[in-house]
Image (cartoon, rainbow, N blue to C red):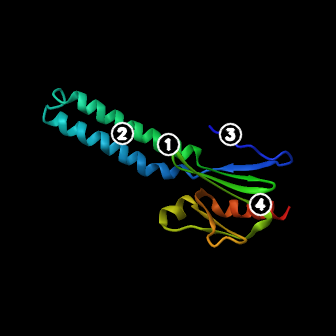
Amino acid sequence: MFKFVLQPDEKLLKITRQAEIVLIKPTLLVLALIYIPWAFLIKYDLHIRFNKILIFWTLLVFLWALHKYILWLINVYIITDKRLISVNYRSLVHKLVQETPLNRIHNISSETKGLVSSLFKIGDVIVQIASLTHPLVLHNLKHPEKLKDFLWSAHKT
């Protein structure tokens, strides 16, 4: 979906993104935003009269859903043998890229909060970086403890 240029002597180790479960909330919202108006208008035989508005609304909701999916798809965390890179799109025109050399990492921890996160083994990886006041947080990852261990092993090599 996008290109990220590595340095000449750099090797890609892993690309990861948020777990698919983060898409459940927008999916349920899309279903509700489509079902409720259609059901209401069909129940009271108003769907013929408002069909253009209903179709426009449905198209608008699908475009919003596509936007959410694309954002999920292009937000990635890249681990190379030299650095950790976080590519975070807040919108299609607002991108934040954070990167740090692996040798500047001081501490890596993982955090899982809540019942659903614990059941599906989804959590955050928190990376403390030298000379930064705030940690770099990799959000909603599957098996965060495995990624934490992977980062430590990449850090040591």
Q: Is residue 95 above or below residue 53?
A: below
Pointer 1 local density, CA inside 10 Å: few below 14, some 14–19, many at least 20: some
Q: Give SS at disc 3.
A: loop
Question: Could you say which quadrant of the image residue 103 lies in?
Answer: bottom right
Residue assigned mark 1 = 69
- Comparing 148 with 57, the one in front is 57
Mark number, residue 61: 2
Q: Nearer the viewer, mark 3 or mark 2?
A: 3
Q: Is residue 40 above or below residue 143?
A: above
Q: Quadrant of the C terminus?
A: bottom right
Q: Give SS at disc 1.
A: helix
Q: CA distance from mark 3 to mark 2?
A: 29 Å
Q: Quadrant of the N terminus?
A: top right
Q: Nearer the viewer, mark 2 or mark 4?
A: 4
Residue sitting at 77 percent across and 60 percent down? 101
Which of pointers 1 and 2 lies earlier in the amino acid sequence? 2
Q: Is residue 57 above or below residue 72?
A: above
Q: Is residue 118 left or right of residue 46?
A: right
Q: Give SS at disc 4.
A: strand
Decide: marks 3, 1 in contact (CB < 8 A)?
Answer: no
Q: Is residue 9 left or right of residue 118?
A: right
Q: Amino acid at mark 3?
A: Lys
Q: CA distance from mark 3 to mark 4?
A: 20 Å
Mark number, residue 3: 3
Which of pointers 2 and 4 lies earlier in the amino acid sequence? 2
Q: Position of residue 44 (x, y in %)?
A: 13, 36
Q: Is residue 9 above or below residue 134?
A: above
Residue sitting at 18 percent across and 36 percent down? 41
